[in-house]
């Protein structure tokens, strides 16, 4: 199963409460059909910004707890963006299935001047720019992350 699905499953598990150990988390994920090793699980924990408390692993609390769950935008773009295509003042971004929303959230979090608004579906992101030039600049910026 894919990394985004596995990480989404981890976050869903943690919505029910802390998980005492990595071994417990690994066992639960294995029962749900995710064949995950300890090293992969450790990377997921780091990528998701999880913290270990006296009760176990949980999502970091604070003002930016939802932001902490997202990996850096450049990493999300490299891993999930398949193509970009400008259309007038719009930029259409194709992603792997199920990845458009986290990528769009990360792109929105950058607060770039070229972007007026963003809409995400399952595998497509539509970014609205003020004009054609801004759409081309935005495409160049995202293409730079893909290189």
Image: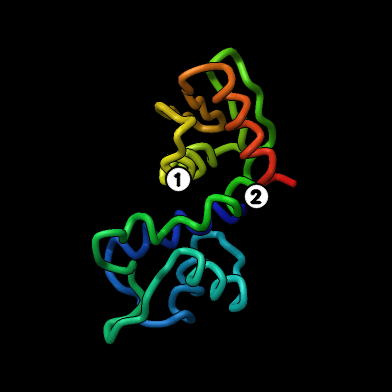
Relative image position of residue 120 (x, y in whole percent): 46, 30
Neighbour class for label 1 at 10 Å: few (<14), some, many (≥20)? few
Residue that label 1 marks: 110
Residue drawn at (51%, 65%), measured in percent from left and top? Answer: 47
How far across and down, in percent of the image, does residue 46 sit? 50, 71
* SS category of the residue bearing label 1: loop
Q: Which residue is mark 2?
A: 79
Residue occupying image coordinates x 69% and y 36%? 82
Q: Quadrant of residue 87?
A: top right
The answer to whether residue 36 is above or below residue 110 is: below
Q: Which residue is depicted at the point 62% across and 77% down? A: 39
What is the tally of numbered marks visible in this picture?
2
Foreground residue, 4 or 93?
A: 93
Please tell me which residue is depicted at 34% across the width and 65% down the height of the picture. 14
Which numbered tag is attached to residue 53?
Answer: none
* Residue closest to the eye, 46 or 97: 46
Considering only vertical position in the picture, is 42 above or below 143? below
């Amino acid at each position: 199963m894919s990394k985004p699905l596995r990480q989404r499953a981890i976050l869903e598990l943690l919505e029910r409460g802390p998980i005492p150990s990595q071994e417990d988390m690994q066992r639960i994920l294995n029962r749900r059909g995710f064949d995950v090793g300890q090293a992969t699980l450790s990377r997921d924990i780091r990528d998701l910004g999880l913290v270990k408390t006296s009760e176990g692993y949980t999502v970091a609390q604070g003002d930016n707890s939802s932001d902490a769950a997202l990996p850096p935008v450049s990493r999300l773009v490299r891993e999930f963006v398949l193509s970009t295509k400008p259309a007038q003042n719009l930029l259409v971004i194709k992603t792997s299935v199920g990845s458009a929303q986290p990528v769009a959230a990360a792109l929105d979090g950058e607060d770039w001047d070229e972007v007026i608004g963003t809409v995400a579906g399952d595998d497509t992101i539509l970014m609205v720019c003020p004009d054609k030039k801004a759409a081309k600049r935005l495409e160049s910026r995202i293409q730079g992350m893909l290189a």
